[in-house]
Amino acid sequence: MPYFRPKTAPMTAAPLRWGILATGKIARKFAQGLQTLPDAVLQAAGSRSLEAARAFAAEFQIPHAHGSYEALVADPTVDIVYVASPHVFHREHTLLALRHGKHVLCEKPFAMHAGEAEEMAAEARARGLFLMEAMWTRFLPAWVQARKWIAEGRIGSIRLLQADFSFLSAGFDPEDRKYSPALGGGALLDIGIYPVSLSYMLFGREPADTASLAHLGRTGVDEQSAYLFRYDQGELAVLSCSFDTHGTKEAVVCGDKARIRVPLFWRARQAILETNDEILETFDGGYPATGLQYQAAEAMQCIREGRTESALMPLDETLRIMRRLDRLRGGWGLRYPGE
């Protein structure tokens, strides 16, 4: 059954103070989103250099800038850390924050492989701290509406999910994180995780059978891949991702009564309920800033309620997804250094 959050915590609740670990592109988008939440405080920024941290802090009017990640997580004025470093460092930086008593929202993909993810989840649970994978798509208003339509029976039983996340990369650079094995490169971990995670959210269980194919490119990582999941009632998920093609970037959730079409599904602003013959309803769910604020709001509400996990992005589901990604890569012979 799709999960919905209750009403948000009253605005009289004390603001939670965020520290942002790393100051790259995704950190900037998160900071822009967080500024739309009146019950959130951008308290500290940390980078590998004090100069970068100070520049980031100045851009977003953040009071504390730290020239190391260790200094950031040791800051006593920080309640929760957003881990925005490249995913090859997610395990290291999440454990660092947890061991300093900080709640953590960790950017996707959660880790390089399931073994790392299991260690991260175990650490958070042992310490009683909140930890969640930052799969921001799940919290966007358009997907909240889509889950409501599904729960109301508007499309009937889900029989088929089609989802693609493909784009034409600006150019090949073997040192770029998208292509470098040492940095966890490959389309699966970078963008394929979106349709895979979507299938877990919608079907709520493991597929009974799977098949997949990939093109491993010049550096040995997957530049294009596709996955077919079959579930125990005959439902199918047809998923794909690519760095080298103009894909649809669309998700279509097909039921035996109607379907839901979500353009640009990973950053969805619209959901369309339709049949073959007509559009039944359109939800235009535009949002301010970057949209990354909705996952932050979820994390803060969970913490205020004394929850250490989100029911919409629970750790056990993150672990199941990481194991699935491992099995998909294993079928292609793709291993990362240190595995």
Image: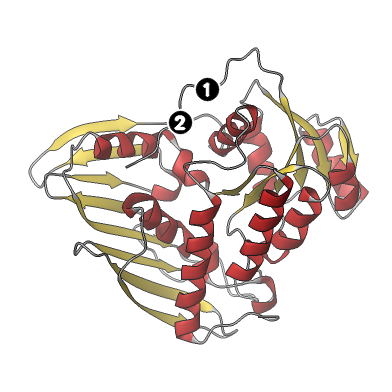
Q: Secondary structure at mark 2?
A: loop
**Residue under the point 22% across and 61% down:** 235
Q: CA distance from mark 1 to mark 2?
A: 8 Å
Asked if labels 2 and 1 touch by Cβ distance under 8 angstroms, the answer is yes
Q: Secondary structure at mark 1?
A: loop
**Residue under the point 46% across and 71% down:** 244
Which numbered tag is attached to residue 188?
none
Does residue 326 appear in the picture of this structure?
A: yes
Quadrant in which the C terminus is drawn: bottom right
Which amino acid lies under the numbered mark 2 shown in the image of this protein? Arg
Side of 303 relative to 276 (left or right): right
Side of 286 relative to 103 (left or right): left
Quadrant in which the N terminus is drawn: top left
Please tell me which residue lies in front, 217 or 94. Answer: 94
What residue occupies the far left of the structure in this picture? 277
What residue occupies the far top of the structure in this picture? 12
Which amino acid lies under the numbered mark 1 shown in the image of this protein? Thr
Side of 337 relative to 224 (left or right): right
**Residue under the point 36% across and 58% down:** 205
Q: Residue 71: where, in percent of width, then height?
A: 91, 47
Q: Residue 274: where, in percent of width, then height?
A: 17, 41
Where does label 2 land, which residue?
Answer: 5
What residue occupies the far front of the structure in this picture? 126
Where does label 1 land, which residue?
Answer: 8
Q: Residue 309: where, in percent of width, then height?
A: 58, 43
Does residue 22 appear in the picture of this structure?
A: no
